[in-house]
Image (cartoon, grey):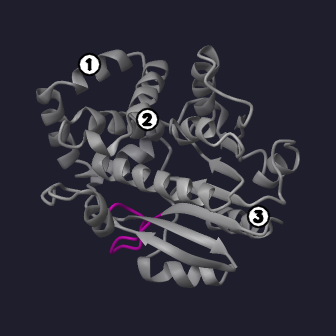
Amino acid sequence: MKDRTPSATAIVVAKNIALVAATPRLSFLVDPAAASLTGLFIQEYDRGGSTFLRRAQQPWFRFLFSLYERCTIPGLALHQALRKRHIERIVRNSLLEGIEQVVVLGGGLDTLALRLHQEFPSAKFLELDHPATQQLKVKMIESRNLAQSNLKLFPVDFSKHSLQDVLSTSPEYSPQENTLFLCEGVLMYLTPTEIESLFGLIRRQEGPKVRFVFTNMELDKHGRPAFRNSTWLVRLWLQLQKEPFTWGLTTNEIRTFLEARSFLLTELVDSKKYRHEDLHGLGHEVIAEGEILCVADRR
C-alpha cells in the first residue's frame, strides 16, 4: 500500500460485502446493520460510492459483476461474506466465554468492532490500521457519533511503529486481560520477519487466555500465496496497487507452524466448511478457495 493512499483492497472487500447484501438469494449472509454501515463507508471512501450502491440493487449490474469475477477470482465476494459471518460467530462466542478485549489488526472498512462494542459494553475493542485507510473510517464514525467509550481506533504505520510500541503506550489496552486478536486478510501482505514478530508479541501477552483469529493464504503449485482459482490479472492488479501477497502456508503446515510458536489450532475453516454450515440449499454457488480461517489459542 502506498504511504498516503488508502488500501485498495479495503474498498474492494467493502463493495463485495455490499453486493452480497444486495443479492436476494444471499442477503441473509450479511447482517443488516453490517450492510448499512458498509454502505456508509463506501460512500465516504469512494466518490462514486452512492452510484455503486444504487447499481448493486440491479440484477443487470450484479450479472456484469459475476462476469468480472470469473476473470479474476470466481466466488470472491461470497467467500468474503462467509468469512466475515464466521469470524463474527467466533468473536461473539469468545466474548461470551470470557474474552475481555478484542484487538483488530488492519480493520480496513470492516464493521465488526463498531457493531459489537455497543452490544458488549463491558468489553474493550481496539482497532489498529494504517492512517491513510483509517482516517476516512474515523471521519464517518465521528460525524455520526457511532463510537462509545469502549471502542478506540488507532492510526498506525507499522513501517514506523511496532505493534508492541502501540499497545504498550495505549492506556486503553490491558495486557493482563483475556484478549482476542483478529487479523483478517492481513498476514498475506507481511514478511516472514514481521510474521514472527506478530506471533511473538501475541504469545507474550500476560492474560490467562489469548486467542488469535487470522486468515492464511495457501500456496499455489509454484509456492506463491494465492487464491486457488485466481487469474494472472489478480497478481497484476496487486502489483500495481503495491499490495502483493508475500506470505502463506499450506493447510498441512498450519498446525505445525502454530505448535512451534506455542499456539494450539482449535478451528480451521475452508470453503467446504463454509458451504456445509452456511449455504444449505445453495450448493451450486461458487466460493473462492485458497484462504483459510484459523482460530488458535496460546498454550
> Of helix, strand and loop, which mostly describes the magenta segment?
loop
**Is residue 224 depicted above or below 146 in this figure?**
below
Residue name at image x 57 percent, y 20 percent: 140
Q: Which residue is mark 3?
A: 201
Please say if the residues under marks 3 and 2 sit with CB atoms less than 8 Å apart.
no
- Amino acid type for the residue under numbered disc 3: Leu
Give yes or no for contact between labels 3 and 1 (Cβ–Cβ under 8 Å): no
N-term-proximal mark, 3 vs 2: 2
Q: Mark 1 sits on what residue?
A: 54
User: Horizontally, is 148 left or right of 15 in the view?
Assistant: right
Residue at left offset 72%, top offset 37%? 150
Q: Is residue 77 above or below residue 132?
A: below
What amino acid does circle 2 point to? Answer: Ala
- Callout 1: helix, strand or loop? helix
Q: Return the x and y of residue 12 as percentages of the image width and height.
A: 39, 37
Q: Splitting the image into 4 quarters, where does residue 207 fall?
A: bottom right
Q: Residues within 10 Å of mark 2 (few under 14, many from 20)?
A: some
Magenta-drawn segment:
216-227
Query: Within 10 angstroms of label 1, few (less than 14), some, or many (20 or more) residues?
Result: few
1 and 2 marks in contact (CB < 8 Å): no
With 274 as the anchor, is 285 left or right in this view? left
Q: Is residue 290 above or below residue 35?
A: below
Of helix, strand and loop, which one carries label 2? helix
Which numbered disc covers residue 134?
none
Q: Secondary structure at mark 3?
A: helix
Q: Residues within 10 Å of mark 3 (few under 14, many from 20)?
A: few
